[in-house]
Image: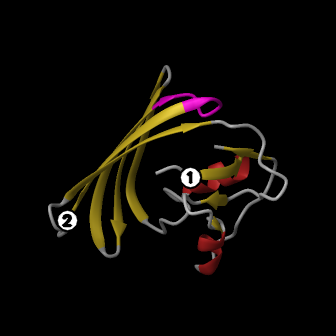
Amino acid sequence: MKMQQCIDASTDQAMQGHGGAAAGNDCSKRDVQKSGSTMTVDSVCTVAGKAVTSHIVVNGSFDSEYTMNITSQGAGGPGGQSGVALTARWLGPCAADQKPGDMIMPNGTKMNILNMPKARGQPGTAGAPANR
C-alpha cells in the first residue's frame, strides 16, 4: 500500500513525541538508541488499557530514504504479536494544496493526522512542509 504524507519539522516532532499522531498512548518506557544510520526504539505503552511492548528499528536517513520495522507484543490480544515493515522516501516539497500532517491514502482520500490529536484536546502543529 502506498500513501503520501506532508511532514514538516513540527509535525515530525509531534508524531515522535506522542508515539505517532494517532496513538494517544501512556508510555512507561521509551528508550531511543542511535548508532550510525540506525535508530532503535524500545517502548512499553498502555494502549486501550493493555500493555504493549514495541521494538522499532529505523535504517537510513529521514532526509532521503529509510526503512522501518516495527514489532509489537500486546497483552491479551489474539496471537499477541504483530509486525509492520515500511519504506519511506523524500519526494520533495509538499504540493501547494497540502499542509503539514496531510496524508493522501491509496484511494485518493486526504486526511490530516494533526486533526486526530486536536479531537482529543492536544495541540496540532504547522511549519515548512516536505513530502514523504
Q: Secondary structure at mark 1?
A: loop
The residue shown at (43%, 39%) is 68
The residue shown at (40%, 60%) is 27
Query: In terms of image quadrants, where is residue 91?
Result: top right
Q: What separation in Å lies between label 1 and label 2 (alpha carbons)?
A: 30 Å
Instruction: Tell me the tag on residue 75.
Output: 2
Horizontal placement of 66 versus 69: left or right? right
In the image, 131 versus 32, the foreground residue is 131
Instruction: Tell me the tag on residue 62.
Output: none
The residue shown at (58%, 79%) is 120
Mark 1 Cα shell of 10 Å, populated few (<14), some (14-19), many (≥20):
some
Is-magenta flag for residue 38? no
Residue 82's x, y, as percent?
26, 54
Horizontal placement of 39 versus 48: left or right? right
In the image, 23 versus 31, the foreground residue is 23
Instruction: Tell me the tag on residue 3.
Output: 1
Is-magenta flag for residue 61? yes
Residue 89's x, y, as percent?
59, 35
In the image, 54 versus 81, the foreground residue is 81
Q: Secondary structure at mark 2?
A: loop
In the image, 9 versus 111, the foreground residue is 111
Report the quarter where the C terminus lies.
Answer: top right
Residue 5's x, y, as percent?
64, 52
First to last magenta residue range: 59-65
Residue type at the position of mark 1: Met
